[in-house]
């Protein structure tokens, strides 16, 4: 029996939480993938994971507060803890869309004001 969309996204987040980006990459579609957040946008899953290696260096913990889904759409409310001076935990909403057993779209919504203060108006792309 194929996995439901919510299970696929849960497994993806578990791999990210372990910093197992090889496994996490396997959950993303090779074609037609899109990632959008207040600080970055990617249409290439491999470039997205090149960026994720930097995030992995500071990712301390990823906790799911709430998850709900409707069909192929999955929403997680997450507490993300990173290890940077003066910056601990931030609540994040992740919207994911699954098609043919792979994640085709991730949209991450969070308050990026602290990030923009740290790096200025640069965008990661």
Image (cartoon, rainbow, N blue to C red):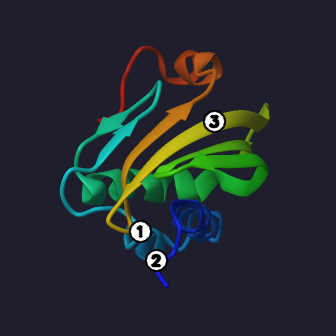
Q: Assign a secondary structure to mark 2.
A: helix
Q: Residue furthest bottom?
A: 1
Is residue 68 toward the left or the right of residue 5 in the image? right
Residue named by callout 2: 23
Residue at 62 percent of width and 64 percent of height: 10
Query: From mark 1 to mark 3, how far is it between C-alphas?
Result: 19 Å
Is residue 28 toward the left or the right of residue 18 in the image? left
Q: Earlier in the sequence, mark 2 or mark 3?
A: 2
Q: Assign a secondary structure to mark 1.
A: loop
Q: Which image quadrant: the C terminus?
A: top left
Mark 1 touches mark 2? (CB < 8 Å): yes
Residue at 52 percent of width and 36 percent of height: 108
Residue named by callout 1: 27
Q: Quadrant of residue 112?
A: top right
**Residue 93's disc number:** 3
Q: Quadrant of residue 91?
A: top right
In front of the other: label 2 or label 3?
Answer: 3
Q: Position of residue 81 (x, y in %)?
A: 75, 46
Callout 2: 10 Å neighbours few (<14), some, many (20+)? some
Residue at 48 percent of width and 46 percent of height: 96
Query: From mark 1 to mark 2, how far is it between C-alphas?
Result: 7 Å
Q: Earlier in the sequence, mark 1 or mark 3?
A: 1
Q: Position of residue 49 (x, y in %)?
A: 37, 58
Callout 3: 10 Å neighbours few (<14), some, many (20+)? some
Above or below residue 65? Residue 99 is: below
Q: Position of residue 107 (x, y in %)?
A: 46, 37
Q: 36 or 1: which is nearer to us? A: 1
């Amino acid at each position: 029996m194929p996995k439901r969309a919510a299970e696929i996204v849960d497994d993806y987040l578990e791999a990210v939480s372990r910093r197992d980006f090889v496994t996490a990459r396997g959950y993303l579609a090779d074609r037609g993938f899109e990632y959008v957040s207040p600080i970055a946008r990617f249409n290439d899953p491999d470039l997205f994971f090149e960026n994720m290696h930097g995030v992995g260096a500071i990712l301390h913990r990823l906790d799911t507060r709430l998850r709900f889904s409707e069909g192929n759409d999955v929403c997680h409310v997450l507490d993300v803890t990173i290890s940077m001076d003066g910056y601990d935990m931030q609540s994040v909403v992740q919207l994911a869309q699954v098609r043919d057993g792979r994640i085709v779209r991730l949209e991450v919504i969070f308050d990026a004001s602290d990030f923009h203060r740290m790096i200025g108006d640069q965008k990661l792309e």
